[in-house]
Amino acid sequence: MDESTINIRLMKAEDFDAVVGIDEKVLKNSRAEYYENKFEKLFKSKDFVPTSLVAEDKDGKVVGFVMGVLYMGEYGIHREEATLDTIGIDPDYQRMGIGKKMINEFLDHLKSLGVNKISTLVDWNDSKLIHFFSANQFSPSQSINLERTF
Ligand SMILES: CC(C)(COP(=O)(O)OP(=O)(O)OC[C@H]1O[C@@H](n2cnc3c(N)ncnc32)[C@H](O)[C@@H]1OP(=O)(O)O)[C@@H](O)C(=O)NCCC(=O)NCCS
């Protein structure tokens, strides 16, 4: 498949099934409830600026998505609080440059909104995702997440 035939557009509420389907194919586990909460928050509330994107092939089939969170407070956009929440490419379409293309469009879109920093949380043991983000110029931040199980 030619990566140039991939179209990137803003995610819509109607993309719910496609997003849940890709997530399930990636994780081999359904997380419909998790995405119900996310979609509820991002599409029904006026507090968040639309930043999430989907990638579709030439037939309009959704083959990847990236979900971003950008809070719109009382005084406008919180430019330091943009996060990349989840990214997923259909396993049949991975390693074709679609993830990279989506990240570039995602960052361009955020830049046009005045945002110049994005953060994301990645499992330290997920070498595939760490490689991907590193290949897309993400680097470890100066703060680390501490936790205690009890
Ligand atoms: C990680 C992920 C987003 C990459 O998307 P992709 O479209 O396959 O990535 P790209 O083709 O744009 O790759 C860009 C670069 O990232 C790196 N990369 C991507 N996949 C990689 C892998 N499996 N191993 C090592 N490096 C990888 C490479 O440097 C690659 O460049 P190259 O192909 O020229 O070597 C995709 O594999 C994915 O969705 N994984 C599952 C993520 C997940 O668990 N999400 C939560 C649930 S949906």
Image (cartoon, rainbow, N blue to C red):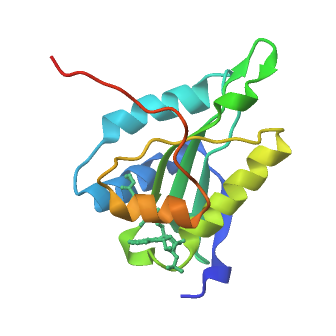
In which image quadrant can residue 149 be found?
top left
Q: Is residue 56 visible?
A: no
- In this rendering, the answer to whether 55 lies above or below 71 is below
The residue sitting at the left extreme is 150
In which image quadrant can residue 57 be found?
bottom right
Residue 125 image offset from top left, x and y in percent: 29, 53
Residue shown at 52% from the left, 42% from the top: 120
* Residue 41 as seen in the image, left or right of residue 51: left
Residue placed most toward the observer, 82 or 40: 82
Residue 37 image offset from top left, x and y in percent: 42, 29
The residue sitting at the front extreme is 142
Residue 148 image offset from top left, x and y in percent: 24, 21
Q: Is residue 40 visible?
A: yes
- Figure quadrant of the C terminus: top left
The residue sitting at the top extreme is 74
* Residue 102 as seen in the image, left or right of residue 124: right
Ligand 1 occupies quarter: bottom left
- In this rendering, the answer to whether 74 lies above or below 128 is above
Residue placed most toward the observer, 53 or 71: 71
- In this rendering, the answer to whether 14 lies above or below 132 is above
